[in-house]
Structure formats: structure tokens, C-alpha cells
Image (cartoon, grey):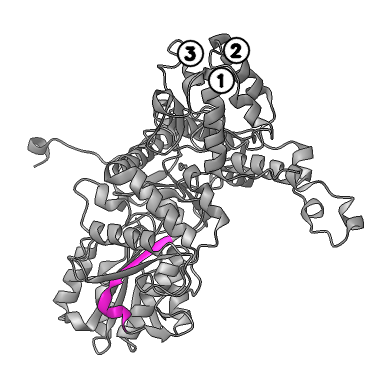
Amino acid sequence: MRPIIQSASRVASRAARRRSIVLGGTASGSSSHCSSNGAHLVHRSVLPNAPAAFVARFKASVPLPDDEEAHVDAPASASVESAAESLAQHEAEPHLDNNTSDTIKDYTAKAGTPSPWAVFDAWGAGEGIVDPLNAEEESMLSPEMVRIPTSEEDRSGIPDESDILSSYDKLLKRKSSVHFGYPYNLMYNHEELYEFMKYSINNLGDPFITSNYGVHSRQFECSVIDFFANLWKMPPDSYWGYVTTCGTEGNLHGILLARECHPDGILYSSRETHYSIFKAARYYRMDAKAIPTLPMGEIDYDALQAEIAKNRDRPVIINVNIGTTVKGAVDNLDRILRILKTLGIPRERFHIHCDGALFAMMMPFVDWAPEVSFRKPIDSIAVSGHKMLGCPMPCGIAISRKEHVKKVEQRIDYLNSVDTTIMGSRNGQAALYLWYSLRKKGLAGIKRDVVHCIETAQFLRDKLTEAGLTCRLNDLSSTVVLERPMDDKFIKRWQLACEEDIAHVVVMPNVTKLKIDKFVEELVECKEEHGRTKPVREDSPLAKLQCSSWGGNYVAPSVGDFKEDF
């Protein structure tokens, strides 16, 4: 039996030959061309009167039959009618890959979804809301059905793997279409890289020192590191970094470097910091201070200054949040640096790590945003790769000053490299996927995504306010914080992240205005049926959400005439 799974490039090239034969052309020359992302297109000059759907990219999801050579001998004078008939026959065939339609639509044509890639919606993340699974499909994913059999007799009572995976694919489509609460960009298309999934690409060891293991993607990883070093204004030859498994690993590495540079230092970070920072403090047995926050989620600068002043005899390690987890608040780096200067803390006595999981990727593209870069006295930045940029696997980037890494570097003869990272074996696929995304998007593409997120978040905030619901949106943020819905089913349906009596929506490139309209409509229905959440205590997150220090529409401040009032 022929294998069902074939490499993407082989399938694409064979599909191109099939299209060429059907249209009476050749597989090269004017009959076809490649788009910027490598997808094959049929040139309009071959079939000028054909509908747009026909000349769009033809996705080959079924292998050609073994007697494909017989098709090569087909007459080159095939008529337009037979071409259309052949295409219709193909579309009627069952497709193994049901992740996307044969025609990849222009994503930019949909309202409220400006994407830099016309075809960078690989499977419909930006489309409408997908229907739930039926009972039969849900049963395919039950523990009993997905269990691993230990004998042929045991196998007889469970469904085939293909049926299980088909239901799983539908489930993921469904869940992804109502994905509102977590900061993952689902708008991506890496089909050109599917060919490389057959290789065990491992970047074990240091990114800049090649080991004896030859199946790696270090050249791509170093290119990604160079991109971010340039984005955050690092001079050449002054930085070190690597592609991590996620933002948490980047934080673990950044705080590890801080502890090695200042073994007796105290770690200061706000109470609304991501849990990985305090996890690092526990792992490394560091003294840590959880500083109170202002109502909008920024660190309380006066409390920070007072706490540092009480411990002047010990080095200062500060985690600066470039976007807090729940409220998307950005700590004011310049104000923190002024505090250190006011207290007379010399540069050699403080270390600053920036947790920028989402917003460190966004802020360089926001006009008039405060600069977070290594031109200022900071020491490391961690960012997630699967959040703003988009990637099918969790990943991230950690960048630090080169001199700090020397403190953790150890020579490993087994690798013929040095150990400088948290992990030993490292996913080389992630570096390749990040490189591909950066090359395809470029600075202009990333900026368009960032502008979309911020503007669409403002649209959501305004819609919620018009509906009479309590909500807030921080400056520089795409995270809309709102009162927690009373119905848990609604929360789970839209996958909202909650903290006590509040919830949030993180607007990413795959969140559209059409989806927001549906979300708000259902939320209003939820409010009418189940009521509204009340603050669980006087200082609860919802109570702080109603605080006037946020400003904005909730408290509707009176704005008087200057001459009359003064």
C-alpha cells in the first residue's frame, strides 16, 4: 500500500503538474508562478475567463494515483470545459487534509481583520465561529476511545486512528474559532515548512557554538536572535540569546543570570507579575518581594522605592513587566530607573530583567510608546514567539548582555559545545518557524498586526461600554479587562481567563470585529439571564476595575469649561 502521508513539497509539485496538464500548459514558464509564501498559483493568462476560485491556489491533499504517468501523455489541447470538469471531479473527492479549503481566501477582505499576509490564515482562524462537535464526534475523543491498545484483541473495540484524528481536528477548529482569553496569534501559515517536520532538528548546546550533532537549525536561530537584538537596540557583539520553549523559560533564564551576577540580591516584582518570576525565585532560593500594584496593574512605584530603601545593603534585582498577565499593564521603566538613581544605587549594584511575553514584541511598533531597549541600563528581555508572532508550537526568545552569560557557561565535551541554556536538547523546529514568520512578515507586517490588535481592542472596549458592562483597557495594551460573566458555560465557550471577579479578552490578529459582535451579543444575553458579578470584597480586582484612577468612560468624569471653572 502506498503511504498516505507525503512531503508537502512533493505533493505540491505533483499537484502543479496535474494542474498544468488539465489546463493544457506546462509545469513551468508562464503557466504558473509562486507567490511570496511559496504557494503555487495558476496564471490567469492560461485561463483568462475562469473564476477567481479556479485560478487561486489549488491545494493538493490527495496523492496522485500510481499511474500518474498516463496523465502526462494526455493531449495538451484539453478544452476549458474539460479543465473545469476535472477540477469539479477533484473537489468531489474526499480530502485527507480538511484543515483548509482548496482556495485560500484573501484574509484582508474581511471586515476588521487587516492582516499583512493575504494567505496567512492556513486553516480559517479568522473565519466565523465553527459549530460544536456532534455526539458521535465527541465520543471519538473519550478516554475509552483514545486509549492505547496492548493487543490486537484489545484493538478490535476502538475506532481507527484516522477517525479519532478527524474528530480532533474538528474540535481544534471549534475551540480556535472562539479563542478569546489567551494571548496566542492563531493567524499563521507554515505549510512551506511541513517538509522539515520529518527531521529531528535539535539545537542542543549553545546557539553560537556548533556541536557535533549536525541536524540543527542554528543558522536560523542566530538570525532570529540578531533580529530581536536589533529590535531592542543591542550593539553588535554585545548580546547573547537563544530560542526558548516559551516565555517562562526566558524568565527562568533571565532571573538565573541575575542571581549569578548578584548572589545576595533581592528580587523585586509586582504582585500582578506572571507566576514564572516567583517560580524562579523558589527554584533559585532567592529572597523576593511582591510589591503592591496600582489599580490599573502597574507596580506601586512609591512602595517599590520604600522597599529598596530598606534594603540598601543588598543588590537590587527588578523584574519589569512589559504587560502584566491579566490587565496588560506596562511598568514604567524610566520611572523605575529614576527611583534607582534617586536612591543612589550604582549600576553595578542593580540588575533589571524585562518580562515582555506579549508586549515587548508590540511596543516597538506603537507610535510614541515608551522605549524599552538595551540603550537603557537593562540586562535581559524575554518574549514569547507563539503569542504576537504566531507559531503552532510554544516558543520564545531570551536576549541578554553577553558578559552575563559567561557566569553560567560550562564546557560539555559530550556536545562539543558549551552549556548556557536552561534546556539541553532544544527544539530546532521552533527556530525555523520563527525565522520563517519574521522573514514573511517583516517590520511592516508586524506593525500592521499590532495596529489591528490595539484598534480592535478599543472597538471591543467601546462595545462593552455601550452594552452597560464594566470594562477597562490599559494604554499600550490589547487586553480588555471586564467583569466576570456569571455563567461558567459562557466562560468556557469563549475560553476566558479569569481572576476572582474579573475576566479578560486578549485581542490578537485572529480576533475580528465580527467575532466581537457575536461575543458581546452573547455576553449581554448572559447578563440578562444570570445577572452581573458584584465585587467579592472592597479591594477585589473588580472593585479596582471600577476605581476612578483608571479614568475613561466608566466614571464619566465631568469636563468643564476652562474659563468657567477657573
To which quarter of the image does residue 304 belong? bottom left
Q: Position of residue 523 (x, y in %)?
A: 54, 37
Left or right for 40, reference 230:
right
Is residue 116 within the magenta segment? Answer: no
Residue at the front extreme of this rendering: 73
Cα distance between the residues tagged 3 and 2: 13 Å
Q: Which residue is mark 3?
A: 50
Measured as percent of width and height from the top left, residue 102 is found at 56, 28
Cα gap from disc 1 to disc 3, whole angstroms: 13 Å
Report helix, strand or loop for mark 3.
loop
The stretch in magenta equals 396-406
In which quadrant of the rendered view does residue 382 lie? bottom left
The quarter in which the N terminus is drawn is top right
Residue 145 as seen in the image, left or right of residue 77: right
The quadrant where residue 487 appears: top right
Residue on which the image places disc 2: 82
Amino acid type of the residue that numbered disc 2 sits on in the rendered structure:
Ser
- Residue at 20 percent across and 83 percent down: it is 348
Examine the rendered structure and indicate whether residue 73 appears above or below residue 559: above
Q: Earlier in the sequence, mark 3 or mark 2?
A: 3
Residue 22: image tag: 1
Is residue 405 covered in magenta? yes
| Amino acid at pointer 1 | Val
Quadrant of the frame with the C terminus: top left
Asked whether disc 3 touches disc 2, contact meaning CB atoms under 8 Å apart, the reply is no
